[in-house]
C-alpha cells in the first residue's frame, strides 16, 4: 500500500497548492526552511513526483493521499461480467510494461480499462493517470497526458520531458484510452515514457496495436451470450424501468441480434421503458433489415449502427436536431456550449435530460455539469449533421462559442477554478481554431485568447504556436503586430533559440509599419537589436553588426519625440550595440540607458536597464556592483505579470544572473535564496537547469546531503531531457564532487567522488583541465584530506587557469593559495598576494585568504576574522574547519 502523509505534510501540501514558496511556508507554519524542504522531499517521494508544481496541482485538485490514478472515470452504472478479461488484464499489466486492449468501438474497452486500473491501484503507489484521447487531435497527445497529470512546461523544458519527470522512477500506471486516431503519436509517447520511466506501466485501449517493442495485447470480444450479455441488458433495462420484466428467451434473442456488443445493448435497454421487450425486438429487426446490404467495416458494428439509427429515428425533431449538432463538440461541453449550437438554453437543458435518459448523451457531474458523447455515438451524429446539411452552420456556431468562451476564460485567470474550466473545454477550443479556413475577427479573437490561456496554463510551445496563428489570421496589421510581440516573449522561454525572438520582433515591426504605427515599429526594431546583442549565445547565426546598426537607424528614424518608453528602448539598443563585443554593453551608454528606463513606469524596462548597467560593471571587474544591481532586479520581479509573455525574458534572465553573480561575489546566502526562488517560480520550475543553480550554493554552504540529493535529481532530469548541452552543468557536477568528498560519514567516500568525477569528465572532456571550478574543487579536497604530497601540481593548476569572468576563478585562486600554505610550498606567501586582487570582489575568497594568512603566520586574529566571515556567509563546513584551526592554535 502507498505511504500515508502526516498532518504536517498535509499542511505543507496545502501551502504548495496556494503557490507559497518554501520561505513563506516556513513563516506560516513556524518551522525552518530546512524542515519545509524535508517535508517537500518526503511528499515528492511518496507521490513519486519530480517537482513541487506537480504537488501543487494535486493539492488544488483536492488529493491528499498518494496512489491515485488521476482522471480515472467515475462510473455511473455497475460493471457487469468480464471476470476472465479483468484477470487477464491485471496479469498482463503485472508482467508486461505495455499492454494494449484490442477491440472494435463499443465493445467496452474503456470501461474494462478503467475497472482494471482501479483494481490495480495497490500495485502502483506512485499513482498515475487515465487519459481519454477521444477529443485529442494529432500533436496534442503529450498535452492531454500532461493535463491529466497536472504537469506544465517550464522555461525551455519540453512537455514530454515534464511528463517523464512527473512519472519519475516510481511504480506508476499510465492509461491511454482510445488511441487509434493518434496511433503513431501515442506509440511514440509510450515508447519514450517506457524508456525514461523504468517503473511505469502503460495500458492502452485501441482498435489496433501500437507496434512498440514488448507490447502485450489482450483481445476484447463482445460479451458472451447466455450470461454476461443478458445480465448487462437486465441491469440497464431495470435502471430505465424498475418494473421491467421480460422472457429470458426474448432477452437472449435481443442480445444475440446485438452481437453481444455492450454499447448496443445499453442503448437498446435504455428504450425498454417506452417500447417493451417485444417492441425492442421488432424495432431492431427493422433496423437490421435496412442495414443488411451495407458492406465494409467491422460486421460487429452492424448491430450498433442499427441501434443508433432506430434510436435516432425514435427521437422527436427537437431531440434529433440537438443530438446531431452536439457532434461538433470533440470533448465535454456545458449547458452554455450546448445552447450555443442548439438554441434556447432552457429548452436545451430539457432536451439534454431526455437524451441522457436514452443513453445517447453521458452526463458528467461535478462543480460544473458537463456532458459528452461516446466516440461511436459522436461519429454517428456527425454523419447525421452532414446529411442534414447543417455542418457549416453548426461549426460557425461552435467557433463563435469557442471565441466567447476563451475570452471569458481570459477574464477569469485570477480565479483559481479557471484551469479546471479551461482544461475541460481546451480540446474544443483547439478543434474550433483548427477547423477555420482563413482569417477573420472571430477566428483572431479565439487564437489570441487561446495563446494567452495556454501561456498562463504553462503550455509554452503551444502558446507560441497560437501567437503565430493569431498573427496570421489577424484582421488588421496592428492586431498582428501585438500578437507577434507577445509571441516573441513566449519564444524566449519556449524555444531554445533567441533567433526566433529576434525574427518575431522584426515581423512585428513590419506589421506596425503597415498599420502606420511608428512608435510600435521603433520599439520592435530596438528590441530586436537589443536581443541580438544581449543574448548572442542563443543565436544559431550571428547577426552582422552592419545589419543591427541599420535596424537601429530605422528605429531612431521612426521614433516619435518625447516618448519615454521609445527613448528607453533606443537607449538600451545603443548601449548593447556600442559595446566592445556582443554580450558586453558600452558602460557610459548603459548608465544612460538605465537612467532612461527609470523614467518609465515599466518594471520590465527598468530591469532591462539594470541588466545593461550590471553587465557593464561585470566586464569592468566590479562584480559586487553587478550583484547589487541584480538584487535590485530581483526586487522588481513581484511586480511583473507571470501571465504576460512580455515579462518572460526579464523573469528568466534575472533568476539566472542572480545566482551567477551572487556566487561570483561569494554571497552564498544570496545565491541560495535566488536559486530557491527560481525553482519556486512556475515559469522556470524545478528542472535540471534550475536544480543545477541550487546545487552550487548548497555545496558551498556545506549542506552536502541536500546538494547531493538535488544533484541526483538534476542528473536524472538531464538524462530525461536527452542530455542537452552538458558543459554548463559542469559547475554543479564539480561542486557535487566537493560535497561527496567532504561528507565525512559512511556511504560517502572515494567511490562516490569517483562517480561524480566521471560525470564531470564526461560533460567537460578536455575543457575540464582548464575549468576554474575543477581546479577549485581539487585544491579544496586536497586541503580537506590533507594530501599535501599532491599539492604542487594542484596549486599550479589553480593559478594557471585563467578564464576571465568565470564564476569560480576567485575560488580556485584562494583555495590554491591556502593549499600552498598548508603544504608549506616555498612561494606560498607570493601566491597569497597573487590571489588577493580577485578576493576583493569575492567574500568567500577573502575569508579563505584570511584563514590562509592565519595559518601561515599563526595569527589568531586572521583566523577569527575568517571564522566571522564564514559565519556571515553561512558556510557551515568552512566555519567548522576554521574553528578547528583556532582551537589547535
Image (tube, helix red, strand yellow):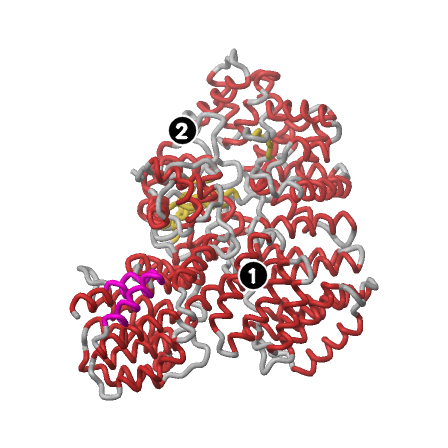
Instruction: Check disc 1 and report its element: helix, strand or loop.
Output: helix
Give me the residue at 51% from left, 19% from top.
239
Of marks 1 and 2, the one in the foreground:
1
Q: Locate the C terminus by quadrant.
A: bottom left
Count residues near mark 2 (Cα–Cα under 10 Å), then give few for <14, some for 14-19, many for 20+: some
Q: Residue 436, image x and y in percent?
A: 73, 51
- Residue 351's place in the image compared with 570, above or below, is above
Give me the residue at 35% from left, 73% from top.
845
Q: Residue furthest top?
A: 243
Q: Give the range drawn in magenta.
A: 860-880
Which residue bears the numbered disc 1?
493
Q: In this view, does 425 lie to the left or right of 850?
A: right
The answer to which image quadrant residue 357 occupies is top right
**Residue 873 included in the magenta stretch of the image:** yes
Count residues near mark 1 (Cα–Cα under 10 Å), then give few for <14, some for 14-19, many for 20+: many
Res. 93 in view: no
**Residue 745 included in the magenta stretch of the image:** no
Give me the residue at 73% from left, 79% from top.
550
Instruction: Check disc 2 and report its element: helix, strand or loop.
Output: loop
Please tell me how many numbered marks the rendered image carries: 2
Q: Residue 345, image x and y in percent?
A: 72, 27
Q: Main secondary structure of the magenta part?
A: helix
Q: Earlier in the sequence, mark 1 or mark 2?
A: 2
Which residue bears the numbered disc 2?
81
Depth order, front residue of 686/592: 592
Res. 276 in view: yes
Query: In whole angstroms, how far apart are the C-alphas of marks 1 and 2?
Result: 51 Å
Depth order, front residue of 767/303: 767
Q: Locate the N terminus by quadrant.
A: top left
Q: Residue 58, image x and y in percent?
A: 45, 41
Q: Which residue lies furthest to the right in this view?
A: 516
Amino acid at each position: 500500500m502507498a505511504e500515508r502523509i502526516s498532518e504536517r505534510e498535509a499542511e505543507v501540501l496545502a501551502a504548495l497548492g496556494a503557490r507559497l514558496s518554501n520561505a513563506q511556508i516556513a513563516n506560516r507554519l513556524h518551522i525552518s526552511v530546512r524542515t519545509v524542504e524535508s517535508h517537500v522531499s518526503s511528499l515528492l517521494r511518496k507521490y513519486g513526483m519530480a517537482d513541487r508544481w506537480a504537488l501543487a496541482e494535486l493539492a488544488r485538485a483536492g488529493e491528499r493521499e498518494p496512489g491515485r490514478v488521476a482522471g480515472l472515470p467515475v462510473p455511473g452504472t455497475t460493471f457487469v461480467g468480464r471476470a476472465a478479461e479483468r484477470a487477464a488484464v491485471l496479469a498482463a499489466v503485472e508482467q508486461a510494461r505495455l499492454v494494449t486492449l484490442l477491440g472494435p468501438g463499443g465493445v467496452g474497452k474503456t470501461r474494462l480499462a478503467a475497472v482494471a486500473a482501479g483494481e490495480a491501484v495497490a500495485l502502483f503507489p506512485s499513482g498515475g493517470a487515465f487519459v481519454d484521447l477521444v477529443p485529442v487531435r494529432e500533436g496534442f497527445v503529450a498535452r492531454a497526458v500532461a493535463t491529466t497529470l497536472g504537469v506544465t512546461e517550464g522555461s525551455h523544458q519540453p512537455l514530454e520531458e515534464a511528463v517523464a519527470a512527473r512519472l519519475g522512477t516510481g511504480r506508476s500506471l499510465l492509461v491511454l484510452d482510445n488511441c487509434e486516431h493518434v496511433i503513431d503519436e501515442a506509440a511514440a509517447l509510450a515508447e519514450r515514457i517506457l524508456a525514461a520511466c523504468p517503473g511505469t506501466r502503460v495500458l492502452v485501449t485501441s482498435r489496433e496495436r501500437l507496434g512498440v517493442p514488448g507490447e502485450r495485447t489482450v483481445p476484447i470480444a463482445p460479451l458472451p451470450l447466455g450470461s454476461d450479455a443478458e445480465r448487462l441488458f437486465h441491469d440497464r433495462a431495470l435502471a430505465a424501468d424498475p418494473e421491467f420484466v421480460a422472457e429470458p428467451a426474448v432477452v437472449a434473442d435481443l442480445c444475440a441480434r446485438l452481437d453481444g456488443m455492450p454499447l448496443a445493448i445499453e442503448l437498446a435497454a435504455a428504450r425498454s421503458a417506452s417500447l417493451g421487450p417485444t417492441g425492442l425486438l421488432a424495432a431492431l429487426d427493422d433496423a437490421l433489415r435496412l442495414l443488411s446490404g451495407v458492406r465494409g467495416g467491422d460486421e460487429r458494428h452492424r448491430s450498433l449502427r442499427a441501434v443508433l439509427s432506430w434510436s435516432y429515428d425514435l427521437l422527436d425533431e427537437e431531440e434529433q436536431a440537438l443530438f446531431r449538432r452536439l457532434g461538433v463538440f470533440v470533448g465535454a461541453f456545458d449547458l452554455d456550449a450546448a445552447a450555443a449550437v442548439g438554441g434556447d438554453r432552457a429548452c436545451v437543458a430539457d432536451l439534454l435530460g431526455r437524451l441522457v435518459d436514452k443513453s445517447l448523451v453521458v452526463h458528467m457531474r461535478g462543480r460544473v455539469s458537463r456532458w459528452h458523447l461516446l466516440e461511436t455515438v459522436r461519429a454517428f451524429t456527425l454523419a447525421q449533421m452532414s446529411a442534414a446539411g447543417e455542418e457549416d452552420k453548426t461549426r460557425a456556431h461552435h467557433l463563435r462559442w469557442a471565441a466567447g468562451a476563451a475570452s471569458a476564460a481570459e477574464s477569469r485567470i485570477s480565479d483559481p477554478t479557471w484551469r479546471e474550466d479551461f482544461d475541460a473545454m481546451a480540446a474544443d477550443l483547439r478543434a474550433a481554431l483548427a477547423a477555420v479556413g482563413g482569417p477573420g475577427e472571430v477566428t483572431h479573437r479565439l487564437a489570441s485568447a487561446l495563446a494567452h490561456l495556454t501561456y498562463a496554463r504553462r503550455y509554452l510551445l503551444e502558446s507560441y504556436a497560437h501567437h503565430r496563428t493569431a498573427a496570421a489570421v489577424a484582421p488588421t496589421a496592428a492586431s498582428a503586430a501585438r500578437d507577434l510581440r507577445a509571441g516573441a516573449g513566449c519564444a524566449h522561454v519556449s524555444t531554445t533559440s533567441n533567433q526566433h525572438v529576434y525574427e518575431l520582433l522584426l515581423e512585428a515591426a513590419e506589421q506596425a509599419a503597415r498599420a502606420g504605427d511608428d512608435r510600435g515599429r521603433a520599439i520592435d526594431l530596438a528590441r530586436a537589436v537589443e536581443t541580438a546583442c544581449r543574448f548572442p549565445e542563443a543565436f544559431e547565426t550571428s547577426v552582422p553588426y552592419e545589419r543591427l546598426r541599420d535596424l537601429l537607424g530605422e528605429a531612431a528614424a521612426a521614433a516619435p519625440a518625447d516618448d519615454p518608453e521609445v527613448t528607453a528602448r533606443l537607449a538600451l539598443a545603443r548601449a548593447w550595440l556600442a559595446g566592445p563585443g556582443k554580450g558586453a554593453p558600452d558602460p557610459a551608454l548603459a548608465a544612460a540607458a538605465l537612467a532612461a528606463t527609470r523614467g518609465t513606469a515599466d518594471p520590465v524596462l527598468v530591469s532591462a536597464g539594470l541588466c545593461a548597467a550590471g553587465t557593464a560593471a561585470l566586464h569592468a571587474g566590479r562584480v559586487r556592483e553587478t550583484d547589487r544591481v541584480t538584487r535590485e532586479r530581483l526586487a522588481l520581479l513581484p511586480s511583473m505579470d507571470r501571465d504576460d509573455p512580455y515579462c518572460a525574458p526579464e523573469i528568466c534572465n534575472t533568476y539566472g544572473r542572480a545566482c551567477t553573480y551572487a556566487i561570483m561575489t561569494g554571497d552564498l546566502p544570496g545565491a541560495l535564496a535566488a536559486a530557491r526562488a527560481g525553482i519556486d517560480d512556475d515559469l522556470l520550475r524545478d528542472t535540471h537547469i534550475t536544480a543545477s543553480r541550487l546545487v552550487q550554493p548548497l555545496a558551498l554552504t556545506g549542506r552536502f546531503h541536500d546538494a547531493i540529493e538535488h544533484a541526483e535529481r538534476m542528473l536524472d532530469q538531464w538524462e530525461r531531457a536527452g542530455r542537452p548541452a552538458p558543459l554548463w552543468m559542469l559547475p554543479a557536477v564539480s561542486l557535487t564532487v566537493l560535497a561527496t568528498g567532504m561528507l565525512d560519514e559512511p556511504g560517502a567516500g572515494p567511490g562516490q567522488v569517483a562517480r561524480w568525477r566521471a560525470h564531470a569528465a564526461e560533460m567537460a572532456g578536455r575543457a575540464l583541465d582548464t575549468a576554474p571550478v575543477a581546479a577549485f574543487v581539487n585544491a579544496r579536497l586536497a586541503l580537506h584530506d590533507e594530501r599535501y604530497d599532491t599539492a604542487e601540481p594542484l596549486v599550479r593548476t589553480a593559478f594557471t587557469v585563467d578564464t576571465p569572468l568565470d564564476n569560480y576563478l576567485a575560488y580556485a585562486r584562494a583555495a590554491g593559495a591556502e593549499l600552498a600554505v598548508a603544504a608549506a610550498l616555498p612561494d606560498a606567501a607570493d601566491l597569497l598576494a597573487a590571489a588577493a586582487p580577485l578576493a576583493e570582489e569575492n567574500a568567500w575568497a577573502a575569508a579563505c585568504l584570511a584563514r590562509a594568512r592565519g595559518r601561515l603566520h599563526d595569527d589568531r586574529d586572521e583566523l577569527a576574522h575568517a571564522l566571522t566571515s564564514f559565519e556571515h556567509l553561512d558556510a557551515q563546513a568552512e566555519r567548522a574547519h576554521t574553528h578547528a584551526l583556532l582551537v589547535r592554535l
